[in-house]
Image (tube, grey):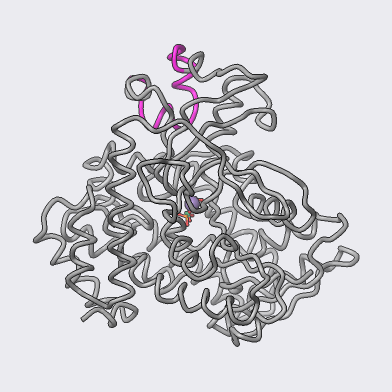
């Protein structure tokens, strides 16, 4: 079985390969093709993978190429984990927004829109090529903003593209653990858009245990989301939001914290990873050791207190080992081996949330088997959550329309309609600012 990884020179690729090395089962991946636009990044990551494979018998073979069509031909599965504009682009997304006093986070608010505007045209080109060159392949999308990018690709690949994120399962596991339950036995009632969802219940042996958590301030205050949102606010909501909702519920504080930071998250990661790739270019030192050291530094920042600037949240060692590579592998296995399982994924709505049309990509528990991912019926969201979901989906649709037409006015509309952009004038300035720094937005006329 052949797996192609787009963004194959990316820093997190060794995590995926590590997960593959642990898979000894029938029908496992035997061949990995790395694709990237940047030769030197491919070379650096290929060196790490070679060292990972050294002690493992029958390790999947690894080849690397900068030719996209060659990488796609014959693939059974394709992981897309690209970053258009690189981490420099992510840092620019943050900086331009902050200069206008709004949030420039990777996936939320103005930053997410800018990232979406430059990523969607590239993602659509990939989807078209996949439809032509590997029509039977399954495409697993991790490229952020994952919900929006998955929806863009689904217009060309239908339900053969499935978006993944590690945050809902991480949240579900933390809640289960704090309740003293086995996370693998819990049913997580979670729904929304990517990075915009809520856990409304958590059933163990048929009983919803979330009310027990909400009723106990000590328990509630003892885990990441409890500390992040505060016990009172979680009790008011009657649900546990995805950590990214912090940027909505505490927007002022998040913007201020970003503004006061010495370095934004994107700038921090850019500098840190540049050092790793530079080291790989200059020396023949042990690649795996250098990668591992950089990874440990990055993970340490997840546990930092300053979540807006230094990390995506406070996590324990268990969560760090249950990341996106595990979701991706579980999904691939379920499809390839027809091993029925349930995962929270980004798929087309198909009537699951009645306020959205059937093509809107949502994040929802899905049954997965050889036929793909099928969303499970869920209760409707409460009004406040429906409001946010509909507003943000409307913004995503404007981003898709702007990417298709190249209309600058439509791009302005996307920014202006976002709940975290507080003036049409700010939206205009954001489009000015972003088109000024991102070559990938030159198509907006
Ligand atoms: C979580 C999110 C991902 C995001 C990542 C950012 O895992 O689910 O969508 O890419 O955080 O982490 P980073 O270390 O790049 O800030
Ligand atoms: Mn995510």
Q: Give the mark count.
A: 0
Front residue of this view, candidates 27 and 46: 27
Q: Residue furthest left?
A: 425
Q: Residue at horizontal 64%, vertical 19%?
A: 206
Q: Residue at horizontal 65%, vertical 22%?
A: 181
Q: Position of residue 17 (x, y in %)?
A: 71, 63
Q: Residue furthest right?
A: 57
Q: Position of residue 60 (x, y in %)?
A: 81, 69
Location of residue 28 with respect to 408 vertically, above or below: above
- Does the magenta-highlighted stretch encompass residue 398? no
Q: Position of residue 126 (x, y in %)?
A: 52, 76
Location of residue 181 with respect to 144 vertically, above or below: above
Front residue of this view, candidates 322 and 370: 370
Q: Residue at horizontal 72%, vertical 70%?
A: 76
Q: Position of residue 135 (x, y in %)?
A: 64, 74
Location of residue 256 with respect to 63 vertically, above or below: above
In-image side of 24 versus 140 (left or right): right
In-image side of 80 versus 403 (left or right): right
Q: Quadrant of the C terminus?
A: bottom left
In magenta, the rendered stretch is 214-232
């Amino acid at each position: 079985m052949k797996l192609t990884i787009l963004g194959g020179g990316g820093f997190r690729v060794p995590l995926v390969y590590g997960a593959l090395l642990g898979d000894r089962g029938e029908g496992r991946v035997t061949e990995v093709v790395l694709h990237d636009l940047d030769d030197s990044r491919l070379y650096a990551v290929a060196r790490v993978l070679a060292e990972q494979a050294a002690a493992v018998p029958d390790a999947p073979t690894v080849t690397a190429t900068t030719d996209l069509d060659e990488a796609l031909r014959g693939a059974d599965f394709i992981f897309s984990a690209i970053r258009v504009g690189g981490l420099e682009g992510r840092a620019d997304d943050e900086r331009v927004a902050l200069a206008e006093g709004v949030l420039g986070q990777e996936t939320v608010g103005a930053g997410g829109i800018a990232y979406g505007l430059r990523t969607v045209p590239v993602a659509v080109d990939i989807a078209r090529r996949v439809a032509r060159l590997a029509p039977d392949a399954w495409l697993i999308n991790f490229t952020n903003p994952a919900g929006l990018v998955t929806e863009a690709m689904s217009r060309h690949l239908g339900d053969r593209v499935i978006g993944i994120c590690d945050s809902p399962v991480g949240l579900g596991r933390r809640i289960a653990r704090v309740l003293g339950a086995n996370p693998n036995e819990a049913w997580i009632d979670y729904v929304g858009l990517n990075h915009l969802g809520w856990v409304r219940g958590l059933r163990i042996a048929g009983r919803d245990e979330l009310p027990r958590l909400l009723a106990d301030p000590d328990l509630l205050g003892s885990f990441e989301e409890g500390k992040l949102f505060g016990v009172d606010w979680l009790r008011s909501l009657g649900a546990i939001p995805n950590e990214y909702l912090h940027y909505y519920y505490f927007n002022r504080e998040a913007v201020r914290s970003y503004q006061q930071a010495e370095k934004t998250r994107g700038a921090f990661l850019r500098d840190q990873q540049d050092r790793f790739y530079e080291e790989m270019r200059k020396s023949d030192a042990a690649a795996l050791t250098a990668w591992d050291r950089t990874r440990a530094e990055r993970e340490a920042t997840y546990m930092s207190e300053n979540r807006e600037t230094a990390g995506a949240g406070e996590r324990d060692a268990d969560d760090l080992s249950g990341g996106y590579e595990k979701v991706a592998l579980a999904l691939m296995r379920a499809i390839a081996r027809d091993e029925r399982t349930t995962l929270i994924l980004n798929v087309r709505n198909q009537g699951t949330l009645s306020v959205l049309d059937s093509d809107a990509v949502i994040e929802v528990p899905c049954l997965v088997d050889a036929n793909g991912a099928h969303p499970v019926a869920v209760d409707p969201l409460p009004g406040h959550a429906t409001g946010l979901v509909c507003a943000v989906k409307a913004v995503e649709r404007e981003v898709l329309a702007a990417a298709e037409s190249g209309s600058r006015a439509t791009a302005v509309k996307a920014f202006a309609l976002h709940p975290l952009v507080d003036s049409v004038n700010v939206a205009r300035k954001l489009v000015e600012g972003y088109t000024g720094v991102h070559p990938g937005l030159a198509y907006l006329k």
